[in-house]
């Protein structure tokens, strides 16, 4: 008897978290410089991109500075931001090449809007630095570990990531009552605290109560966006 694959491979899972995460803090390895706030986003390759301004400690430093950037992924549940995962990405700073700056800025602005991104492109004083990644430490509600740069960069986010994020927001904001009823029928227990937490080609994760996550795998990994959307519809409104 074949059993379904219940969850994405760890590198894919971590890349998916990174794609939806925001830089929050940065520290310089081997120095007494205190940890400071970080601004920016994550590019299409999964590399943290930092937006730095004059007066900030990275602005005047040489490239190839070894740093650790904290990336935090959250989920909005009824107006409250709940943490999904923390990634500590260690690597060496490098300038974003001029010919890649616009594409990079647009990519991170889609998830992390910042007026200074435009200033950086228009010849202003802010500049963009990205990380040549060495390793990634990940910590989620259910798992933790370390990925080397090769495994992390060779993977990719879930192919339905953008659709998944749109559907999660839609279900939690507009169909919460139906979803709670569906989870109550499925589990046989009161599911008033149920929220749709994560979606991917392998299944759905439901947050039933404080830090209790229930994984619901699809029968098979879903091959197309249409199949993915249909599976989510059946989950929320079962016949």
Image: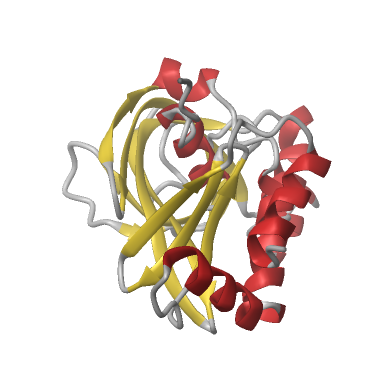
Residue at 48 percent of width and 21 percent of height: 2
Its colouring scheme is: secondary structure
Q: How many marks?
A: 0
**In the rendered image, which quarter contains the N terminus?**
top left
Relative to residue 229, is residue 143 drawn left or right?
A: left
Asked if 158 appears above or below 205 in the picture, the reply is above
| Between 41 and 162, the one nearer to me in the picture | 162
Residue 49 in view of the camera:
no
Residue at 59 percent of width and 43 percent of height: 200
Residue at 51 percent of width and 36 percent of height: 15
Residue at 31 percent of width and 73 percent of height: 210
| Between 6 and 33, the one nearer to me in the picture | 6
Q: Residue 230 at what x, y percent from top left?
A: 77, 50
Q: Splitting the image into 4 quarters, where does residue 182 fall?
A: bottom right
**In the rendered image, which quarter contains the C terminus?**
bottom right
Q: Residue 31 at what x, y percent from top left?
A: 19, 42
Q: Residue 104 at what x, y percent from top left?
A: 71, 40
Relative to residue 233, is residue 92 drawn left or right?
A: left
Asked if 30 appears above or below 69 in the picture, the reply is above
Relative to residue 18, is residue 126 drawn left or right?
A: right
Relative to residue 218, is residue 7 drawn left or right?
A: left
Asked if 202 appears above or below 78 in the picture, the reply is above
Q: Residue 18 at what x, y percent from top left?
A: 50, 44
Q: Splitting the image into 4 quarters, where does residue 169 fall?
A: bottom right
Residue 159 in view of the camera:
yes
């Amino acid at each position: 008897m074949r059993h379904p694959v219940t969850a994405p491979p760890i590198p894919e899972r971590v890349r998916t978290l990174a794609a939806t995460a925001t830089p929050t803090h940065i520290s310089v390895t081997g120095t007494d410089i205190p940890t400071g706030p970080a601004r920016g986003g994550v590019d299409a390759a999964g590399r943290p991109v930092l937006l730095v301004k004059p007066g900030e400690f990275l602005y005047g430093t040489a490239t190839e500075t070894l740093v650790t950037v904290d990336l935090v992924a959250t989920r909005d549940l009824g107006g409250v931001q709940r943490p999904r995962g923390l990634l500590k990405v260690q690597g060496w700073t490098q300038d974003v090449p001029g010919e890649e700056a616009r594409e990079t800025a647009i990519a991170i602005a889609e998830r992390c809007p910042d007026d200074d991104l435009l200033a950086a492109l228009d010849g202003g004083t802010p500049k963009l630095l990205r990380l040549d990644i060495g390793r990634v430490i990940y910590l989620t509600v259910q798992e933790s570990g370390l990925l080397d740069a090769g495994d992390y960069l060779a993977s990719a986010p879930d192919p339905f990531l953008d659709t998944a994020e749109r559907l999660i927001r839609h279900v939690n904001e507009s169909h919460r009552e139906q979803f709670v009823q569906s989870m109550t029928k499925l589990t046989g227990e009161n599911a008033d605290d149920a929220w749709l937490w994560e979606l991917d080609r392998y299944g759905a994760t439901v947050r039933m109560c404080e830090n209790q996550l229930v994984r619901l795998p699809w029968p098979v990994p879903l091959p197309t966006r249409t199949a993915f959307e249909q599976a989510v519809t059946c989950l929320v409104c079962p016949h």
